[in-house]
Image (cartoon, rainbow, N blue to C red):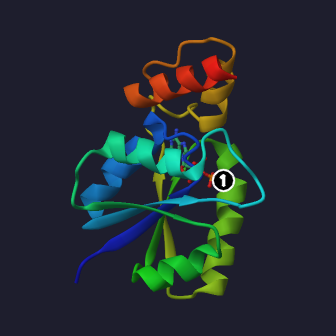
Amino acid sequence: MERLAVYPGSFDPITNGHLDIIKRGLRFFDKLIILVAYNPNKSGLFPVEERMELIRQVVGDDPRIRVDSFSGLLVNYVRDSGAAVILRGLRALSDFEYEFQFAHMNRRLAPGVDTVFFMTDERNHYVSSSLVKEVASLGGDVTGLVPHAVVDALAAKYRRK
Ligand code: ADP
């Protein structure tokens, strides 16, 4: 049977931390759906379509990866997609509390769906989309923390603002 996992997140924008989780996820799962999960009442820096486009550029043409977006209850998407696993990354203790609640709530809502965590890579443990945006907005160099396409997209965004 094909092992399919859904990796949900805001991805506003995708960072090298996310990419690391994706690459490692592909060692354990046959297919991965990278899901830009969004709240229609909250706007991020990048519109959902741009976030998806950046992810596509960065992961390239890999038949094992699908990029999608969704704004409803995550477990409904996961069940409809036929996946049984939600993939998440864990950085420091600060992620744990939230991820713990999120995983338990999802298991309560959908007992057949489980969450698998990958511990952050030592090079990316402090990398988050929000910190990267803050640094880039102040003119700091984020090369090495995000893929090149994202460095350029951030520069363009903040130049326009
Ligand atoms: P969310 O808003 O749902 O937390 P994010 O895009 O910030 O979405 O993150 C998606 C997932 O990727 C989360 O599980 C988060 O912990 C994980 N993640 C983000 N950055 C890193 C990183 N540097 N290393 C490991 N996991 C990460």
Q: Quarter of the image for the N terminus: give it.
A: bottom left
Establish if 4 lies above or below 146. Answer: below
Q: What residue appears at the point 45 percent right and 32 percent down from the top-left corner?
A: 122
- Camera-side residue of 74 and 46: 46
- Camera-side residue of 6 and 47: 47
Establish if 89 lies above or below 100. Answer: above
Please name the residue that numbered disc 1 is placed on: 96
**Residue type at numbered disc 1:** Phe
Please identify the residue farthest to the front as the structure is shown.
160
- Camera-side residue of 52 and 120: 52
Q: Where is residue 161 in the image (x, y as percent from the top left)?
A: 70, 23
Q: What residue appears at the point 57 percent right and 82 percent down from the top-left corner?
A: 76
Q: Is residue 52 left or right of residue 59?
A: right
Please identify the residue farthest to the bottom as the structure is shown.
111
Q: Where is residue 29 in the image (x, y as percent from the top left)?
A: 29, 66
Q: What residue appears at the point 54 percent right and 22 percent down from the top-left corner?
A: 156
Quadrant in the picture for residue 92: top right
Q: What residue appears at the point 24 percent right and 78 percent down from the top-left corner?
A: 2
Q: Is residue 72 left or right of residue 17?
A: right
